[in-house]
Image (cartoon, helix red, strand yellow):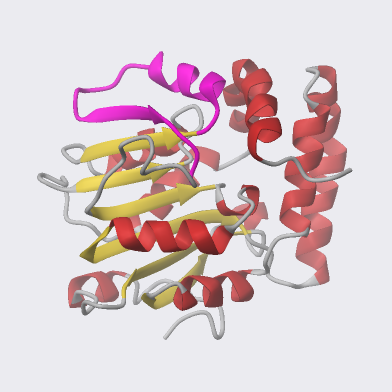
Amino acid sequence: MTLLRDADLAAAFDHAAASYDTLVAANPGYHSHLRRSARRLGLPYPGTGLRVLDLGCGTGASTAALRAVLPDADITAVDASAGMLRRARDKTWDPRVRFVHASAEGLAEAGVEGPFDAVFAAYLFRNVADPDAVLAAVHDLSAPHGRLAVHEYTLSGRPLDRAVWTTVCRGLVLPVARALGDGDLYRHLWRSVVEFDTVDVFTERVRAAGFDRVRALPLPGWQTGVTHTVVGCRADAPAPASWLNSLTGERSRPGGGR
C-alpha cells in the first residue's frame, strides 16, 4: 500500500479517533514515555511564563504529558485531524491550553506564531510529506534559546529492532485495528516507521535544520531501539548548562549527539 498523506491521512485519523485512546493505552509505557520525553526538554518547573508548542497533539496524550511536566506553561496544541482534535478538546484542561486545527505545514495560515520556548512533536515527522520543511518551520518558530524534543518511532537500524516492531504490529496492533475498521491507518503507521529515517539519519536531519547539541535518547521496555527522543537547541544560542547537565545521565545513541 502507498503511505497515506495529507487529507487522506487526516481522514483516516478522524475515523480512528473514537478508539484511538483505548488502543494506545494497551501499549505498555505509552503515557510514561511521553512524560519522559517532555522532561527531556529540560525546562524549569513549573514552566511559568513559558510558551510550548505541541505539534501533532492527536487526542491530547502529548498535551497531557507536557501539562504534567510543566503545569504552568502556556501550551498551544495543534493537529491536522479534526476528529482527533475533538477528542482532545473534550477532555478537561486549564485555560493555559489551547487547541488549533492545522497541519504541521500550515501553522502560519492558522495563526500559530512564535516565539516558543520549546516545541514538542510526538509521532509526527514520519507522517509528514516534507520533514525538512516542517523542521525549518519549527526552527523559525523557536525562541533563540528554544528547545526541541521529537518523540518518534525511529528504528536503530538493527534488524532485530525492525523485527520487533513488525511482530508487534502484525501480531497485535493490526488485528485489533482491522476489527475496528481502521486497518488502512494502522498499516500505514506500521510502514511509516520501517520506511522512515533510522534514528541516526533523523538526528542528522535535525542538526542540518539548525539545531545544536542534538542527541538521540532511547526509551525503555520493548521500545528500546524502536522509539527515541531526539532533543536539540537552536544553534544560534548556547545550550544552557543546566539542560546539558540534566542529560548527562542519559545514554545517547553512538554518534547521535555532540
Quarter of the figure with the C terminus: bottom left
Q: Is residue 225 left or right of residue 137?
A: right
Above-or-below relation of 218 to 106:
below
In magenta stretch: residue 232 = no
| Closest to the observer, 88 or 66 | 88
Query: Quick one: which residue is furthest to the left in this view?
Result: 49
Q: Is residue 207 left or right of residue 66?
A: right
The quarter of the displayed image where residue 69 is located: top left
The location of residue 6, given as percent across then percent down, is 64, 38
Q: Is residue 146 above or below residue 250?
A: above
Q: Is residue 188 visible?
A: yes
Relative side of 236 to 227, left or right:
left
**Residue 82 lies within the magenta run:** yes
Which residue range is magenta in the image? 80-104
Vertical placement of residue 141 versus 6, above or below: below
- Judging depth in this view, the residue of 80 and 62 nearest the camera is 80
Residue depicted at x 58% and y 69%: 202
Where residue 72 appears, as percent x and y from the top left, is 16, 38
Name the residue rendered at 76%, 35% in the picture. 186
Identify the residue at horizontal 61%, vertical 76% (top origin): 200
